Structures are given as structure tokens and as C-alpha cells.
Image (spheres, rainbow, N blue to C red):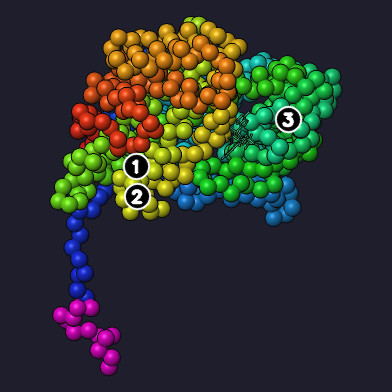
């Protein structure tokens, strides 16, 4: 008999190879809301205090292991696409994993797609932003159709006859993923299709043509012929689309199905092969005489759809802030458990510098985002409306652009296990650049800031009225604001300098908010590292004197069972 196949009782063949020690644990089963001091304080400060109870309940759910797993599953089992059913009928059907549908259902049942429209009140945008921020930490991809549905409402309202039919379904807290006409549904979702092959930033080059079916004009039916090269969430029930009408580029509402129950010929050619954002299907389409109704005035398409785009840009701020919070939480948690060279990582000075810096960036992003949520709630005040006009571009540019490197640094804090696909970090890392590119890439945001400064000079006063509220409290910030005031007086060659100036505007906004509202150990560290140091700021380069331990303690989420 072969002795290797029948080892003796004490054989080394069965021996334990090693003892387990110093292993990290999953960050789960914690209250994502109550364990986030920066978010909680912002909600209370910016007018959402009435939502504390529901946010705490929501945060308990989003931080639970089972719920976090939905995010993993929705990305692991990616959407699949069929053009036709097996009998030959055109269906344009994308099939998703049940976890994706669960994330959509929760979002819609909690009003992430509509609550400020259906229940407007002081703090409605703040409460919705906080919930989106929590849900975005679980999974980002499904946020795309939720955001587009949310953002479609102001644009739809430009056409009251269409809005009266569609808005009740768009805002209903009913998720119905069936591939059937909107007429058969109580709740619908809305997508957005502007980008064509020849240009996404410059949508005025759109070549899709719109032919009036009858008289033409606002609210009237047209047939659209052309293509749309990026159509995310193609299972949406309708899309806001730009096309060239006889009177110029116009906005249209294009349903997936025609009212007679036939398939509207916006045909999906294939799904995009994306490096991130995997749970969200993005498609390439052709429009072969697709029925659509004109929204708003003919020839005013860009202006009309921009109502939608400014909302989606704000949601990019929320999404990237959420990504940074989750990345920081993952790193902070891991380093509170893991030791190296005989000491827990978060007790070691150099790691403390990195962790505190990641936490500062995350808090600054959360704080600016929530401040803008309050501005959204108060657009009837001129000052707040001007801030929305200017700071959605500044904030979208800055926060989204700070996220990819932040994700990578957080991954490095975790070490090798942070690189593994069964960790959340690769997903956060691959997701991070997407927000910077869609809804107007970085340069386009900077050019939009220039447009606002030139066409609506009152935004400059609104900006300084906001940042000057911290004047006199922090010498570095005072100097920073004074330098900006000089730069903004002179818009010559601004286009060339725009990134530099917009960077500094974003820092002024974040620093001003932190000086006014955050503990001094946070705001001083932020100002000294971002305003006081010369050269490009790399994470982990906080200067001497910063209380890194206090920043880490403030930001580290605590797991109740630990
Ligand atoms: C995952 C994903 C999903 C998407 N989903 C949708 C969707 O659902 N609907 C939709 O309509 N679109 C969608 N898009 C498209 C997206 O909005 C565009 O990719 C984006 O607007 C940029 O357009 P583009 O790709 O044509 O790049 P371009 O317009 O060619 O721009 C390329 C680069 O040039 C820069 N640039 C442009 N103009 C200037 C200038 N004047 N000065 C300096 N720099 C400039 C831009 O900032 C960008 O960095 C999606 C994109 C991605 C990645």
C-alpha cells in the first residue's frame, strides 16, 4: 500500500502549517450615519436635523454586512444584454443581478430619486444628499439612473403638459424594472442621452435630427434619427435627449416604448466595456425614427437640459464624497486592527500622517457637499442661487478630481489585501475617475466657472460673501482669500489659468467651512497643509504640530460588536 495515501496518525501531512494572528476584519455591521461625525454635524447644521431619526436607521442598514454585500454582488455579476428574444422580437433587454434591483428598490422607496420634489421643505435636499451619501458608500453604479431620474424633474417641468403625465410616475416611490410600456407602470426611471460619437463636451455638434410628426413645437411629437454613443441605464423608461429640430438643437423626452405598445426604435447596439462602474449598464444606441416629445422651447435644448445637468453635477459631488468617506473608513478601520513592527498601524507616526490626511480630505468634501445641499434648498434666496450656479461646477471639478488618488492612498494603507478583488478597494478605485469625466469633465467644469464669472458677475460677490464668513479666524485663509480676490479681478487668459484658480476657489470654500464649523484640530490641519505648504500636496505630508491622533479618532468608524 502507498503510505503517502494512508498517513500515520502523527504524520506531518495533517499538521497545522501556521497560527492565525494579526488578521484584519471586514468593516461592516456599523452605523454608517452615527459613526460619521462630519456628516452628522453637517446634517444638523445645514437644516436636515429633522431627518436624524430616519438617517440613523438608514445608516444602520447601509452599514450592515448583508447590505454591503449587495454592492459586491451587483458588481461581480454584471449586466447582460440581449437585442432580441429567442423568437426574434427586438427587446433591447438588459438583465441585472437581483442585488442591483434591490439597491434600486431601496433608493426609490427612500426617495433618493425624488424626495425634495415630492416633499419640499427646509433641509429636504440636505436629508436626501445625506441618504445618497450613505447609499453611495454601498454601491455607486446604481446611483446613475437614480440621479438621472432625480435630475430630470426640473427639466421636465419646463413642459407642463408632459410633466403632468410623467412627473407623478417619475417621483413615485415604486421601482418597477419590467420591460413594458410606462403606461403599465406606477413608477418609472429616466435616463439622459446627449453624447454622440463626434463629441460629448460640445453637444452643439449633435447630429441626431428631429422631424416633426405634426405641427411641431413644445410638447409636440417628433421622430428622431441618429445615434447616442453613451446611454447609461438603457432600461430607463424614458430619456431626455438632444436633437437638431428645424429650429435648432432641442430637448426631447423619448420613451422606451411607444404609447401604442410597440417598441420605440432607440436600438441598443451593445453595452460599453467600462473599467469601472460595472453594475451600471452603459450603452451605444441608434435612433431609427424614435418617437419623442419636445421639452421646452425649440432651439433651447442645451439651456433646457442644463437644468438636469446641474443636478447630476451636484450628485457627482455627493458620489465622490461618499467614495472618499468609504475609502477613508476602510483605511482607518484596517489600521485600527492591523499591527506591523509590534505596533498597531494607526499608532505609528507616519501612518498617522497619511490616515489623518485622508480623513481631512474626506471631511472637507462632505462639508462642502452638504453646504451645497443647503444652497439647493434655498435657491429662492439670491445668494444661495448664485452659489448653486458657481459652486456646483467648482465642487464637481474639485471633489471628483481629488477622489482617484485618495482611493489609491487608502488602498495602500490596507496593503496587499486592499488590492484583492474581494475587497471593496478595487471597486472604489475603478469607480473614482468616472465622476470626473461624465457630466462635464474637469476642463469643462473650469470653463463653466469662467462662463459664470463672465456672464453672471454677481457670482463673485456671492463667492466672497460665503468664504469671508471665516475671515479673521485663520491667517492662512485670510491670505488665500485676498490672493484670490486679486486673481478674480482679472479674467485675462483665465482659460489657461482656470484649473489653478478653480483649485484655489475650492480650497477657500472648504477651508472657510471647516474654520467655521469643524473642530480646530481639523480646520488648522486643513489650512496648514492645503493653504500653508508650497507645491503639490501629497497625502501624508501634514506639517508638524497637527493633532493627527485627534483627527483619526474623529473619523474612525466604530463597530458596535468590536
Ligand atoms: C461611464 C460613462 C457613462 C456615461 N453615460 C452617459 C449618459 O448616460 N448620457 C450621456 O449623454 N453621456 C454619457 N457619458 C458621456 C460623458 O458625458 C462624456 O464622455 C463626457 O461628457 C466627455 O465627452 P467626450 O467623451 O466626447 O470627450 P470630449 O468632449 O472629446 O472631451 C475630451 C477631453 O477634452 C476636454 N475638453 C473639451 N473641451 C475643451 C476645451 N474647450 N478646452 C479644454 N479642454 C476641453 C474635456 O474636458 C475632456 O477631458 C458617459 C460617460 C462615461 C464614461
Q: Residues within 10 Å of mark 1 (few under 14, many from 20)?
A: many
At mark 2, the secondary structure is helix
Q: Residues within 10 Å of mark 3 (few under 14, many from 20)?
A: some
Query: Residue visible at 20% across and 70% down?
Result: 16
Q: Which residues are magenta?
A: 1-13
Q: Residues within 10 Å of mark 2 (few under 14, many from 20)?
A: many
Q: Is residue 387 above or below residue 171?
A: above
At mark 3, the secondary structure is helix
Q: Which mark is residue 410?
A: 1
x, y percentage for residue 92? 67, 45
Mark yes or no: residue 211 visible: yes
Quadrant the N terminus occupies: bottom left
> Could you say which quadrant of the image residue 553 lies in?
top left
Q: Is residue 410 above or below residue 11?
A: above
Disc 3 and disc 2 in contact, CB within 8 angstroms:
no
Answer with left or right where residue 428 lies relative to residue 273: left
> Could you say which quadrant of the image residue 12 lies in?
bottom left
Q: Earlier in the sequence, mark 1 or mark 2?
A: 1
Query: Residue visible at 41% across and 31% down?
Result: 321
Q: Earlier in the sequence, mark 1 or mark 3?
A: 3
According to the image, label 3 marks what residue? 205
Q: CA distance from mark 1 to mark 2?
A: 8 Å
x, y percentage for residue 384? 47, 10
x, y percentage for residue 29? 29, 40
Disc 1 and disc 2 in contact, CB within 8 angstroms:
yes
Amino acid at each position: 500500500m502507498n503510505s503517502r495515501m494512508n498517513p500515520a496518525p502523527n504524520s506531518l501531512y495533517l499538521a497545522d502549517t501556521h497560527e492565525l494572528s494579526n488578521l484584519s476584519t471586514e468593516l461592516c455591521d456599523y452605523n454608517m450615519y452615527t459613526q460619521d461625525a462630519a456628516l452628522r454635524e453637517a446634517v444638523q447644521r445645514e437644516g436636515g436635523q429633522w431627518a436624524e431619526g430616519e438617517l440613523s436607521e438608514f445608516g444602520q442598514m447601509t452599514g450592515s454586512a448583508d447590505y454591503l454585500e449587495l454592492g459586491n454582488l451587483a458588481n461581480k455579476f454584471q449586466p447582460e444584454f440581449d437585442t432580441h428574444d429567442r423568437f426574434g422580437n427586438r427587446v433591447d433587454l438588459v438583465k441585472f443581478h437581483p442585488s442591483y434591483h434591490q439597491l434600486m428598490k431601496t433608493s426609490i422607496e427612500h426617495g433618493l430619486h425624488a424626495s425634495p420634489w415630492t416633499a419640499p421643505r427646509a433641509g429636504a435636499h440636505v436629508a436626501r444628499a445625506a441618504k445618497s451619501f450613505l447609499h453611495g458608500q454601498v454601491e455607486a453604479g446604481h446611483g446613475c439612473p437614480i440621479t438621472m431620474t432625480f435630475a430630470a424633474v426640473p427639466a421636465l417641468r419646463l413642459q407642463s403638459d408632459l410633466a403632468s403625465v410623467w412627473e407623478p410616475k417619475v417621483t413615485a416611490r415604486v421601482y418597477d424594472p419590467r420591460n413594458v410600456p410606462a403606461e403599465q407602470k406606477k413608477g418609472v426611471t429616466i435616463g439622459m442621452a446627449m453624447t454622440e460619437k463626434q463629441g460629448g463636451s460640445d453637444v452643439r455638434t449633435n447630429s441626431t435630427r428631429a422631424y416633426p410628426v405634426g405641427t411641431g413645437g413644445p410638447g409636440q411629437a417628433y421622430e428622431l434619427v441618429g445615434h447616442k454613443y453613451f446611454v447609461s441605464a438603457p432600461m430607463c423608461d424614458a430619456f431626455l435627449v438632444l436633437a437638431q429640430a428645424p429650429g435648432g438643437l432641442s430637448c426631447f423626452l423619448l420613451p422606451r416604448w411607444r404609447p401604442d405598445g410597440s417598441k420605440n426604435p432607440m436600438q441598443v447596439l451593445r453595452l460599453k466595456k467600462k473599467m469601472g462602474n460595472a453594475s451600471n449598464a452603459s450603452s451605444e444606441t441608434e435612433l431609427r425614427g424614435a418617437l419623442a416629445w419636445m421639452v421646452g422651447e425649440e432651439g433651447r435644448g442645451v439651456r433646457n437640459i442644463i437644468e438636469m445637468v446641474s443636478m447630476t453635477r451636484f450628485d457627482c459631488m455627493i458620489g465622490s464624497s461618499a467614495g472618499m468617506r468609504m475609502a477613508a473608513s476602510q483605511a482607518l478601520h484596517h489600521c485600527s486592527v492591523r499591527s506591523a513592527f509590534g505596533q498597531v498601524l494607526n499608532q505609528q507616526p507616519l501612518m498617522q500622517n497619511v490616515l489623518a490626511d485622508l480623513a481631512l480630505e474626506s471631511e472637507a468634501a462632505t462639508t462642502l457637499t452638504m453646504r451645497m445641499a443647503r444652497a439647493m434648498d434655498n435657491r429662492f434666496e439670491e445668494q444661495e442661487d448664485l452659489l448653486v450656479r458657481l459652486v456646483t461646477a467648482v465642487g464637481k471639478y474639485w471633489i471628483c478630481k481629488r477622489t482617484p488618488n485618495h482611493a489609491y492612498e487608502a488602498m495602500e494603507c490596507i496593503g496587499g489585501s486592499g488590492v484583492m478583488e474581494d475587497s471593496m478597494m478595487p471597486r472604489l478605485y475603478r469607480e473614482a475617475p468616472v465622476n470626473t469625466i461624465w457630466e462635464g469633465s474637469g476642463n469643462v467644469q473650469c470653463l463653466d466657472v469662467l462662463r459664470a464669472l463672465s456672464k453672471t458677475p454677481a457670482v463673485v460677490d456671492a463667492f466672497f460673501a460665503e468664504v469671508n464668513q471665516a475671515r479673521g479666524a485663520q491667517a492662512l485663509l485670510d491670505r488665500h482669500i485676498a490672493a484670490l480676490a486679486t486673481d478674480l479681478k482679472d479674467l485675462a487668459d483665465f482659460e489657461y489659468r482656470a484649473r489653478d484658480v478653480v483649485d484655489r476657489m475650492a480650497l477657500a470654500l472648504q477651508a472657510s467651512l471647516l474654520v467655521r464649523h469643524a473642530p480646530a484640530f481639523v480646520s488648522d490641519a486643513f489650512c496648514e497643509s492645503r493653504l500653508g505648504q508650497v507645491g503639490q500636496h501629497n497625502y501624508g505630508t501634514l506639517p508638524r504640530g497637527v493633532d493627527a491622533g485627534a483627527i483619526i479618532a474623529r473619523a474612525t468608524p466604530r463597530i458596535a460588536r468590536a
